[in-house]
Image (cartoon, rainbow, N blue to C red):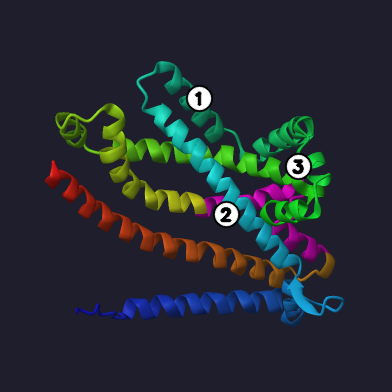
Amino acid sequence: MRYRKYLISRLDIFIALLLIAAVLYIGYRINVGLHYKWNWKIIPQYLFRYDAENEKWVANLLMQGLFTTIRLSAWGTVLAMFIGTVMGLCRISQSLFKRLVSGTYVELMRNIPPLVLIFIFYFFVSEQFLPVLGVEEFVRNSSWPVQWVMAVLFAPPTLLNEFLSATVTLAVFEGAYITEIVRAGIQSVEKGQWEAACAMGLSKWQQMRYVVLPQAFGRVLPPLTGQFISTIKDSAIVSVISIQELTFQGMELISATYLTFEIWITVALLYLMLTLPCSMIVGRIETYVNRFLSVGLHDFVRRG
């Protein structure tokens, strides 16, 4: 087995020293220039607190905000993947109408500020559309187990409309970028692959299913990872409609404690805890998918 050698050059040491010096200088300027008094001891109690009534540790404001961010990002990504895949297939369709619909959707979403979209969807979806559907009323009148499941998966009944509105907004906004990723991934498959699949007698759907989509999936996985991480970060913007996600809870704590730097640094570290593992996990998945596709396509071609 060959082991990869990790060498540290003089340039690496110089850059590391430069970064350490920059961090020390920023800390010095905060202490001297702003006369800031650090108080890190108070931060852990905003992550977890001891519930004396139930005699156990429970999540406090920052962790509650983190869990809301996870739910928001997860549901937003799932919905955005569905929208992006459908619209991506429409973008390469031979139907002019489908191409016009998907193209209009992409151009609208990419050229409207997300903050404007949030307010439009909030006042339309949350204030007009969801009350007509009676989602919040249905959850309120449901049994306790149903309310508990809905609160764990989505949000408490009192905040359900706002949560759904924010999720739809994120999904529609991010779906436009996923549409272009899917379109580019499919169009990046070489023309010879289509011709080879056609020569084997496969129908159009079989060409797409067995030959094109597997290859395109391996190619779009890295940009999709970036888009998922972008969704996690973009979820912070829904704090403007009082969704109690991580950024919203951080701002609330800063207003109450005036610990600006401690709170924001903690919030940044919590976001890093979400995004860095995602990058590492998808990097592993990408390796396995490429290895599986290379072996799978080889067997497929060999069997003819």
Residue type of the residue flagged with mark 1 = Thr
Q: Secondary structure at mark 2?
A: helix
Q: Which of the marked residues, 2 or 1, is nearer the chain's N terminus? A: 1
For label 2, the crowd category at 10 Å Cα-Cα, with few meaning under 14, some 14 to 19 and many 20 or more, is many
Residue marked by disc 1: 104
231 within the magenta span: yes
Q: Nearer the viewer, residue 117 or 260?
A: 117
Q: Residue at x 61, y 57 (%)?
A: 70
Q: Residue at x 46, y 31 (%)?
A: 87
Residue type of the residue flagged with mark 2 = Ile
Residue marked by disc 2: 232
Residue marked by disc 3: 161
Q: Which residues are the magenta region?
A: 229-255
Task: Check residue 118 in the rendering and tell me which mark sits there, or answer none.
Answer: none
* Spatial separation of the CA atoms under disc 2 and disc 1: 25 Å
Quarter occupied by the N terminus: bottom left
For label 3, the crowd category at 10 Å Cα-Cα, with few meaning under 14, some 14 to 19 and many 20 or more, is many
